[in-house]
Amino acid sequence: MTPEPNLMAGTTTAETAAVERGGPPHPVLVKIRDLIYKVAGIYQPDDKLCFIEEKISRRMRARAIRDFSDYFESLTAKPERDAELRELLNEITDGETCLFRSLPQMDALRNSILPELTQVKSHMSQRKLRVWCAGCSTGEEAYTLAMVLADEIASKYPGWTFELTATDLNERSLAAAKEGIYGDYALRQTPDHFRDKYFLAAQGQFQVKPEVKSRVSFSHLNLADERKMLFMKGMNLISCCNVLIYFDANSRRRAVQHFFSNLLAGGYLLLGEAESLYTFQNEFRLVHFTQATAYFKPSHSSVPMVKL
Amino acid sequence: MSSNVSINVVDRIKNMESLPTMPTLLQPLLSCIRRPAGEVEIDEIVKLAEQDESITAQCIRVANSPLFARTRVAISLREAVFSLGVRRVEDILLSICVSRLLPRDKYVVDPMAFWRHSLGCALVARKLAEMIRFEDPDGVYLAGLLHDLGIIANAMAFPKEFHLALEEAVVQHLPLDAAEQTTLGFTHAESGAILAELWRLPPHCCEVIRFHHDVASAPAGGHATYIALVSLADLLCRVRDMGYGYPEFLRVEFAAHPGWELLMAQYKELEKLDLVRFTFEVSDAVSEVSAVVNLIFPGLTPTPDPGDPHQRPN
């Protein structure tokens, strides 16, 4: 697989970033980035290449592999490739989750998506937004959405309310999510306003206030369970961050098809900051916001291309 | 369009108090750039650049920056041309010349942001041109670099009104051209086109400057591809931290943009473009583009986007 050409002719930005660090990145590292993007749809930016290098080295030590090229081999050659790729993805995303993980995405939600959703729905009698956090893990993403929605709706959308369902496959994660207790590190990106307003101090940690907890209903759901997926209809917004990257191509396509049919027209699908649906066909329309992207289910009345 | 702009406006642009003078290098450089790459001799470029010592020195510094440099470090202009090629050195010289068009003392816009946007747009537009196999990527680069010339014209000919427009845009998170339309009654696209014609810039640049915010009104044929490429690159830069220096609330559906549709009809290669990945690569380039702007303007301190609370954490 050939790496995509970068913006600068003659040299890739990855190379130049590495030159500043003293020495070009191992070309295999760039190949691994491209492989991860191709199979999992997740992109590692240049400034994170040294970070995946570390993770890869850790996997190499675990497998007693000494050479980058041999490791690349283990990611591409059967029979071990699927298992090893999963291990590597686990390593890469381990400890990454936190509240307000993507601030630009939350800005897009506040500044563009919410105004649009409330406009689309404003002619309806029921002023309620239905939101689904799919693959919520230990609850960070779900509570982030709940806090942002509660905050925005209270200040800008009188008469509106929202219903937030958060699902995960893992019962232990769900139990932790329901507790809603997080350490400093999980709150490292949480703006002060939200930290002060929506958390209680709990023995050196932070607990999500009951008023926020009560806005989220956690439940068990396997995104590969076709029958149960049919029951999640009528959504305005679905957030599914860094979950699909663990699916094989077929399950991912099916899950995304379900998301599409579960969304109401005019609704949005949010993915992780570095994720892309490009690698397979889907009916969503890609929308760019400032420093964030989302996927849009078109409504019959078309939305202007560039909305002020 | 100049028909929308009163004669008074045209006069004010023509008689700007301190109309920036074109660097003497710019016209001969432009004529080099418009010729096929194979016809331009290394000596020709070197001689041209050596007319201005400060430009030569700056060119060598930029040539050695991570954005352009490979492993070998150039210490003379000739070496730079050898290692980077005539076209890249022309790019650098051009960026330096164009950057000198903006007066250094009378900025209304943040100069770092302005040049980061212009250079970023030039690079992104050229890359897109190469991807779809358009025959003149370097012409696209030039047009990208100059597309916001009207901001300079407005800042100089109408400083008070333009300042108001900018304030309005920052407070309301509006695109600059929308705020200009309200405050001035015309946009930098229109005033830029007037200045471009006055300076006898190549016709495709004049059209890109005039229509980059309004691709749908551009005359068919002619320079439509240049206009489409630059307008898409302009939006891509603005959604990826290379905008006008303040956060805009943008919502862009590229696949439904008239520029995209225009290119789709003619360039099948565009279907293969993974726009999400390309967008990540635009972000990857931001720090290097900023580094070059710092080299072109050694005196300026790099300013983060004012009012943008979310600088990407490292």
Image (cartoon, rainbow, N blue to C red):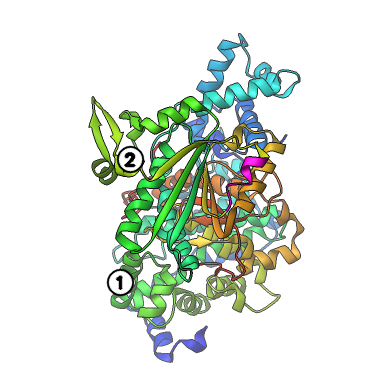
The residue at the point 51 percent across, 38 percent down is A167
Residue A266 lies, in percent from the top left, at: 56, 61
Which range of residues does the magenta coloring cover? A227-233
Whether the magenta-drawn stretch holds residue B131 is answered as: no
Rendered view: A262 above or below B186: above
Rendered location of residue A138, percent (x, y): 44, 31
Residue B267 at what x, y percent from top left?
Answer: 74, 61
**Residue located at (30% from left, 40% from top):** A210
Element at label 2: loop
Spot occupied by residue A41 in the image (x, y as percentages of width and height): 62, 39
Task: Residue at 75% x, 21% y: name it.
Answer: A77
Q: Is residue B198 left or right of residue A254?
A: left
Q: CA distance from mark 1 to mark 2?
A: 34 Å
Viewer-nearest residue: B157 or A204: A204
10 Å neighbourhood of mark 1: few (<14), some, or many (≥20)?
some
> Which of the two marks, 1 or 2, is nearer to us in this view?
2
Answer yes or no: are tags 1 and 2 on the same subunit. Answer: no
Residue B276 in view here: yes
- Front residue of B130/A227: it is A227
Circle on res. A93: none
**Residue reaching furthest to the top:** A64
**In what quadrant of the picture does the C terminus of chain B appear?**
top left
The residue pinned by badge 1 equals B163
- Mark 2 sits on what residue? A190
Q: Amino acid type of disc 2? A: Thr
